[in-house]
Amino acid sequence: MLSGPVDVCVDRPVLSLDRPFTYELPAELEAGVGSLVRVPFHGRQVRAWVLGPAEEVPARMLSVRALASPVRFFDGPTLELLRWVSERYVAPLAAVIARSHPPRVASVERELLGGGGGLRGGRSADSTRLARLVPSAPPAPPTDPTGLARLVPSAPPGPLVRYRNGRSLLEALCGSGGTFVLRPAPEDEVAVALECVGAALQQGRGALVLVPEADPLPATAIALREAFGDAVGMLLGGGRNERYRTWLEIRAGRYACVIGTRPAVFAPVPRLGLVYVCRESHALHREERAPYYHVRDVALERARILGAACVASALLPSVETTAMPHVLVEPHERRWPPVEVVRPGPEGRAPRLVSALKGARRGFLFSPVPGYGVARVCRACGEPAACAACGGLLRAEEGRVRCTVCGSDGRCAGCGASDFGVVRGGAERVEEWAGRIARVPVRRIGRGRGPRPPGPAEILVGGIEAVKDFGPVGLDLVAVLDADVASRRPGLSARERALASWMEAAAWARPNGRVIVQTRHPNDPAVQALVTGRPERFHRAEATRRAEAGFPPGAPVFRVRGVPGLEDELRALRPGTLLVSGLGDESVCLVALDRAGVAEFGRAVRALAERGIVSRVEAEPHL
């Protein structure tokens, strides 16, 4: 408990107020670091979190008025992590704290605590109390190594002992910590996650497994839950009450292993010894709302603070991950499905693919372009097809022609007609022609059709949205129909996202199955990475390309909006890259920095926000 002058973080998530405020904390409130309190602020009572004893005591202070919750939402090490996130992503600390746990539900607290304060103290005491307060809960796992080891079923050694640096990773899970990039063999992806979590639990250490998406439930999450049962907690979707209840149970020590999406990177797992990031290069590991953090970076920092091991696992690690200091863990021998490279045929019907389709009973056709085709010409006036509302591209999809930019029904910008000549090509058209060739049903993953693996006698057609963590699927045929689309897509990471999807789809093929990629550029580094199953050449090419564009891998990037004159203020900070554009009356500056300069940049931007020059900061924007 704390009393006397304390620093608090006021729940006002704006950069201009991003600093601690000092208040007098009465002892009778029994508050401490992480407590949620109510304080007077600018004539109103607002929420605030206690950060700790004040370092500088002003001559006059207001008093904390009330304790808003008996729960302490963070401890000292977690506060260190939250402050790091605030600095790294130039985000208000209040925003970081608010996003580090599910929204509070007072009724759930009353139900679990019975009106008491059982969640205020240490985690070992909470564990016993919470297990007693929640009738459906199994006994909370003990926090001693022997007790946690009993949760792990005995099993033979997993694949890691046969991997390069696999034994080093297993030793790190015993307590030494470290950063590891894991490139599992396709058939081992789930098995190595199980082995890592099991090794951590055997040592009496908790595990945190981060997945990019919750629907459908990833195969890794399913396997962990089946292996470790009630020791596994899920922060995956659910209603507001359910998520807060689960978070309180995690904090109380009920679960030894926690599986969750982005927000779970802050989950208060007791005695954390492993942070495992699944499909690390997946785009959904980047938070789309303030504070815009990336799970990979937060996981690395949290592991460093706690002395835990951080494992970034992916068939294709991101360029950013390979640029940081790490230990690479991978099979000694090449274990990758054979990949055949062919030139595209009409509408993607290469002769070798057509032949393979005739004999396949179970397969997946990766078609990156949605719809049936693209409208090229207006049949009424002969003008090139363009949206009448915005001038955008028109695509035939689900029996209608729509604008790909604004979504309007397709009408000619010249004459308003809705009859267009369409150049056929896209997932719908692939479904049509493949259905005439294959001897089993061909179906498409499209609007309103949830992703799933192909059935026992079925061929599915889909794009990136269809490639999920289904575990080993064992397909006869996997085909990438237009690999060259990746090089034409906008975005600095478009090629990496495409290659990651190709590799995850190729991993669905059984060992003696077939993987066919159609491309006019067989020597492209991305295509060769798919062929060999080794991305080193691709990573080198990507690192060079991004550096030449002014955004080298690992360089912090910010998009800053503000009044005219912002450019001159930011240029004085000497960023590595500064690109400027306009948006109405505001200036928009895209800035790339050296990591060592982020702290200075953050202080300067906060000062500019106080002066009214900066209105918004977005970290790691999609480029």
Image (cartoon, rainbow, N blue to C red):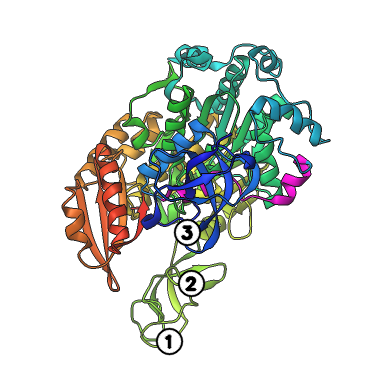
**Mark 3 crowdedness (10 Å alpha carbons): few <14, some 14-19, many ≥20:** many
Secondary structure at numbered mark 1:
loop
Amino acid type at image mark 3: Gly
* Location of residue 580 in the rendering, given as x and y in whole percent from the top left corner: 22, 61
Disc 3 to disc 2, how far (Cα)?
A: 18 Å
Amino acid type at image mark 2: Gly
Disc 2 to disc 1, how far (Cα)?
A: 16 Å
Left or right of residue 439, residue 304 in this image: left
Q: Is residue 189 magenta?
A: no
The reply to whether the C-beta atoms of the residues labelled 3 and 1 are less than 8 Å apart is: no
**Mark 1 crowdedness (10 Å alpha carbons): few <14, some 14-19, many ≥20:** some
Left or right of residue 325, residue 49 in this image: right
Quick one: label 3 or label 2, which is nearer the N terminus?
2
Vertical relation: 252 (above or below) 38: above
For discs 2 and 1, the disc positioned in front in the rendered view: 2
Query: Is 16 in front, or is 323?
Result: 16
Q: On the image, numbered disc 3 is attached to which residue?
A: 426
The answer, for residue 462, to whether it is visible in the render is no
Give the dominant element type of the magenta stretch: helix, strand or loop: helix
- The quarter holding residue 122 reads top right
User: Residue 407 got which mark?
Assistant: 2
Q: On the image, numbered disc 1 is attached to which residue?
A: 416
Task: Name the outermost residue toward the front.
Answer: 59
Left or right of residue 66, residue 534 in this image: left
The answer, for residue 444, to whether it is visible in the render is yes
Amino acid type at image mark 1: Gly
* Location of residue 151 in the rendering, given as x and y in whole percent from the top left corner: 70, 19
Vertical relation: 151 (above or below) 510: above
* Location of residue 523 in the rendering, given as x and y in whole percent from the top left corner: 29, 38
Vertical relation: 395 (above or below) 248: below
* Location of residue 336 in the rendering, given as x and y in whole percent from the top left corner: 46, 27
Quick one: label 2 or label 1, which is nearer the N terminus?
2
